[in-house]
Amino acid sequence: MGSGLESVRAFGVWTHGGGVNFEIEFEREEDGRWIAEISELPGVMACGATQGEAEAAVEALALRAIADTTIVQV
């Protein structure tokens, strides 16, 4: 019995404003869905029907995670 993941893996880089780069790791499941994860941001993982959809979803989630943890000093 397999783990549910194929051996298809890819990596990309997402640049957040201010020049901060995050590595995105992609994995393709046996059913064809793509999983995208930014391991530097705990809990930031998303899936999509295509690699592009998974990438867009994980970037949107990363923005939320960054916004939730950003402290604004006045």
Image (tube, rainbow, N blue to C red):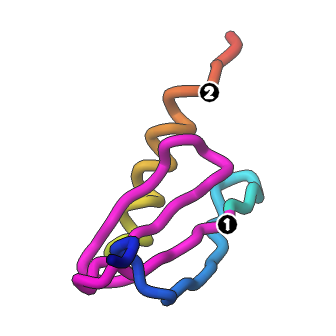
Question: Which residue sits at x=39%, y=71%?
Answer: 3
Q: Could you say which disc has been placed on residue 23 in the image?
A: 1
Horizontally, residue 47 falls left or right of residue 74, namely left
Q: Earlier in the sequence, mark 1 or mark 2?
A: 1
Q: Which residue is mark 2?
A: 70
Identify which residue, 62 or 40, lies in the foreground.
40
Residue 50 picture quarter: bottom left
Element marked by disc 2: loop
Is residue 34 something one can see in this rendering?
no
> Eyeballing the image, is 4 above or below 8?
above
Element marked by disc 1: strand
Image coords of residue 32 (percent x, y)? 27, 86
Mark 2 Cα-neighbour bin, 10 Å: few <14, some 14–19, many ≥20? few
Question: Which residue sits at x=50%, y=38%?
Answer: 65
Horizontally, residue 13 falls left or right of residue 42, namely right
- Residue 56 is inside the magenta segment: no
Residue 22 picture quarter: bottom right
Is residue 51 something one can see in this rendering?
yes
Q: Residue furthest right?
A: 19
Q: The C terminus is located in which quarter?
A: top right
Image coords of residue 63 (percent x, y)? 49, 47
Image coords of residue 12 (percent x, y)? 62, 78
Q: What is the span of residues highlighted in magenta in the rendered image?
A: 23-52
* For discs 1 and 2, the disc positioned in front in the rendered view: 1
Q: Residue furthest front?
A: 1
Image coords of residue 20 (percent x, y)? 75, 55
**Alpha carbon distance from label 1 to label 2:** 20 Å
Mark 1 Cα-neighbour bin, 10 Å: few <14, some 14–19, many ≥20? some
Q: The N terminus is located in which quarter?
A: bottom left
Q: Residue furthest top?
A: 74
